[in-house]
Amino acid sequence: MSKVLLTGFGPWGSEKYNPSAEIALGFNNVVIGGYRVVGVVLPVSYRRVISDLPEILVKIEPDIALHIGLAPKSCEVRVERVAINLMYSEKGDVDGFKPVDEPIVPGGPVAYFATLPTRRIVERLKEEGIPAVLSYSAGTFLCNCAMYVSLHTIAAQRLETISGFIHIPYIPQQAVGKSAPSMCLHLSRKAVEIAIKESIDYLKQRESSKNR
């Protein structure tokens, strides 16, 4: 059966709960459009993402790799267009690592574009009444790192996988007392499901055009 790798992130710092982890695990083993979802939670660790994610991708060989993470200041779903080969974090990850403008992959390409149908996903989300935007910066923390590592691994291993990243906002409970925007978990989950469905449709249409 065709597969979708869906990754979220675990807790980090003051964020003891990460909705991306709940969404990823909630979709684990769910079949969407004939594709089985494999949900995985990644630690908020540069070292672990750089070492573990390539192994996961090579082992699973998914047709689609969708990575999701938390964007605390966002009021909408952000579909990322590009990942850069750069790590920077003042607060550090769960290991206490605080890189300053270090490359994720020394000697690797400066950047990779997402290979998911990003514009199509954004338009579909808007049609469904979900606030969404196409973003051109995934930051320099673990979300950007996971996206870059995924796309670099796919290129280096010549996998037949399309990949990308989606940022989701806080859920309301996380925003309490922070004057921060939020989105209910149900809506974020629906956004992820729509992104998966649009990616599946994109692959099916691409395959159909090849066979003409």
Image (spheres, rainbow, N blue to C red):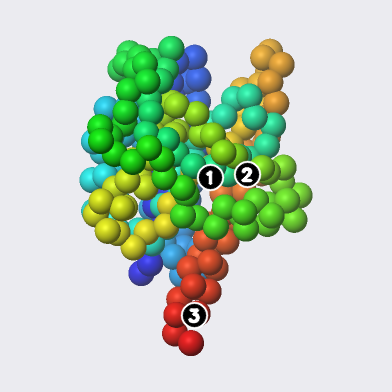
Please name the amino acid that badge 2 sits on: Leu
Q: Which residue is mark 1?
A: 81
Q: Using residue 188 as the reference point, say whether residue 51 is left or right of it.
A: left
Q: Earlier in the sequence, mark 3 or mark 2?
A: 2
Q: Which residue is mark 3?
A: 208
**Which of label 3 and label 1 is nearer to you?**
1
> Could one spot residue 125 in this view of the protein?
yes
Q: Using residue 46 as the reference point, say whether residue 21 is left or right of it.
A: right
At which x and y percent is residue 26?
48, 46
The residue closer to the viewer here, 27 or 170, is 170
Please name the amino acid that badge 3 sits on: Ser
Q: Which residue is mark 2?
A: 134
The residue closer to the viewer here, 85 or 10, is 85
Q: Is residue 210 above or below residue 138?
A: below
Q: Residue furthest bottom?
A: 212
Please name the amino acid that badge 1 sits on: Arg
**Quick one: SS at disc 2?**
strand
Mark 2 nearby-residue class (10 Å; few <14, some 14–19, many ≥20): some
Location of the N terminus (image quadrant): bottom left
Dot 1 and dot 2 residues touching (CB under 8 Å):
yes
Q: Is residue 204 above or below residue 55?
A: below
Residue plotted at (34% across, 17% down): 99
The residue closer to the viewer here, 159 or 14, is 159
The residue closer to the viewer here, 78 or 31, is 78
